Amino acid sequence: MTASTVADMGELVHLVIAERVATITLDSQHNRNALSSQLMDELGSCLDDSEAADVRVIVLRHEGPAFCAGADLKERAAGSGRRDSNPMVDVLRTLMDTARPTIAAVDGAVRAGGIGLMAACDLVVVHRAVNFAFTEVRLGLAPAIISVPILRRVPAAKIASAMLTGDTFDADYACEIGLVTHLSDDVSATVGSLCDDVRSGAPDAVAETKRLLHRVPTLDRDAAFGEMQALSDEMFLGLDAAEGMAAFREKRAPIWPD
């Protein structure tokens, strides 16, 4: 694949923002949404634009029969793509570190780096028929970068066989080990419901909850209690808590600041 061919292919990642939800769609169907240089650049830009728009939720979805096939091997073999992996690391970090909950909406097969992209999201909604495989070892590679988000949500012993063998595994097993959070027969409907639920919470409270989900497991027990006690005391004295508790007493929906 030449650089001119890539340029002629048009946009591979689309961003739509509506009702404070950013929906990012992978749409490189000719190569099963493989992680080409162009796709990674556009995905990074869409994430940056979502952050700048101050959305409440970021949804990562796809067009076509595959969520993501992993690295663009044709581009790599031809030497026409970027050699460094910084864009992949940046995208995974953004998905993990943004204060906004991120949701992967997966309706098709996921392979290799695509599993890492999915695992970097906070919530992962998968159709029950989807399957997965770490194909790296069968290509003389290792699932190196993607191991960072994956091993933060899945015990190594639970994922070792899949990583070491490259064998395909199904959505039920992915959910059982924690790689997937939701199985669904209607991924779009489940994601829509989750977005509604997130937006019903106070923005700062949701952001702090996402942060503690990542932060607390890295601390020893006493440090965790110290930090979380301080956070709890601060938030109980905040305006959001006052509004939330008033709404509870008055049996109405809370009105959160934008």
Image: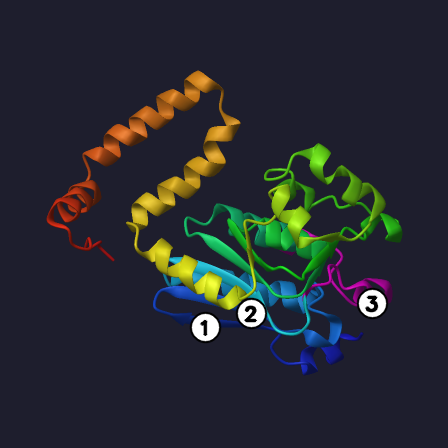
**Number of numbered discs visible in the structure rendering:** 3
Disc nearer the start of the sequence (3/2): 2
Q: Cβ–Cβ below 8 Å for labels 3 and 1?
A: no
144 in relation to 198, above or below: above
Name which residue lies at 51% across and 49% down.
122
Query: First in sequence: mark 3 or mark 1?
Result: 1
Picture coordinates of residue 247 (x, y %)? 15, 49
Residue position marked by numbered label 3 in the rendering: 74
Q: Alpha-carbon neighbours of circle 1 within 10 Å: few (<14), some, or many (≥20)?
A: few
| In the depicted structure, whether residue 142 falls above or below residue 7 | above
Name of the residue lying farthest toward the top: 222
The residue under the point 25% across, 58% down is 258
Q: Marks 2 and 1: in contact by CB < 8 Å?
A: yes
Q: Nearer the viewer, mark 3 or mark 2?
A: 2
Which residue was labeled with disc 1?
A: 16
Q: Amino acid at mark 1?
A: Val
Residues drawn in magenta = 67-87
**Residue at position x 56%, y 66% from top?**
61
Q: Is residue 254 magenta?
A: no
The image shows residue 10, relative to residue 157, as above or below, that is: below
The spot of residue 238 in percent (x, y) is: 20, 39
CA–CA distance in space, label 1 to label 2: 8 Å
Horizontally, residue 249 falls left or right of residue 200, namely: left
Disc 3 vs disc 1: which is toward the camera?
1
Q: Give me the residue at 54% from left, 51% from top.
A: 121
Q: Secondary structure at mark 2?
A: strand
In the image, farthest residue toward the bottom: 8
- The answer to whether one can see residue 84 in this image is no
- Extreme residue in the left direction: 250
Q: CA distance from mark 3 to mark 1?
A: 29 Å
Pick the residue in front: 121 or 76.
Answer: 121
Residue holding disc 2: 25
